[in-house]
Image (tube, rainbow, N blue to C red):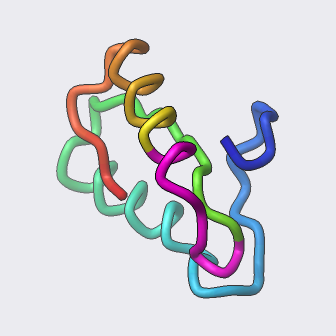
Amino acid sequence: LISKTDTPDDIGPGSGWGHGTHVAGIIDRIAPGSRLMPVRVLDSSGRGNSFDLAYAIEWAANQGADVINL
């Protein structure tokens, strides 16, 4: 995971700036009782590697994630 902190803030500016916040707002609107698990995998340029991505997906699934948005 990118920052290995509990702070889910968007890091920017960059191509990923605001994406997580935008998606979280949509989810809250259509499923207000849902719980969100923000996990940062890509850097502010929207880049990362396959290992970090696979690790994050496995980690989120092990924490009980039912839906994953990338």
Decide whether residue 37 is among the magenta residues.
Answer: no
> Residue 30: x and y, percent?
18, 52
Number of numbered discs present? 0
Tell me: residue 35, above or below residue 32: above
State the extent of the magenta-drawn residues as a range. Answer: 44-53
Between residue 22 and residue 16, name the one nearer to us. Answer: 16
User: Where 63 falls versus 29 (above or below)?
Assistant: above
Q: Is residue 14 above or below residue 66?
A: below
Name the residue rendered at 39%, 35% in the picture: 57
Residue 64 found in image quarter: top left
Where residue 2 sits in the image (x, y, percent)? 72, 49
Which SS does the magenta portion mostly show?
Answer: loop
Please identify the quadrant where the N terminus is shown.
top right
| x then y, percent, for residue 27 | 29, 52
In magenta segment, residue 46: yes
Residue 41 on image: x %, y %: 58, 51
Front residue of this view, candidates 17 and 48: 48
Who's the residue at 29% across and 43% down the image? Answer: 68
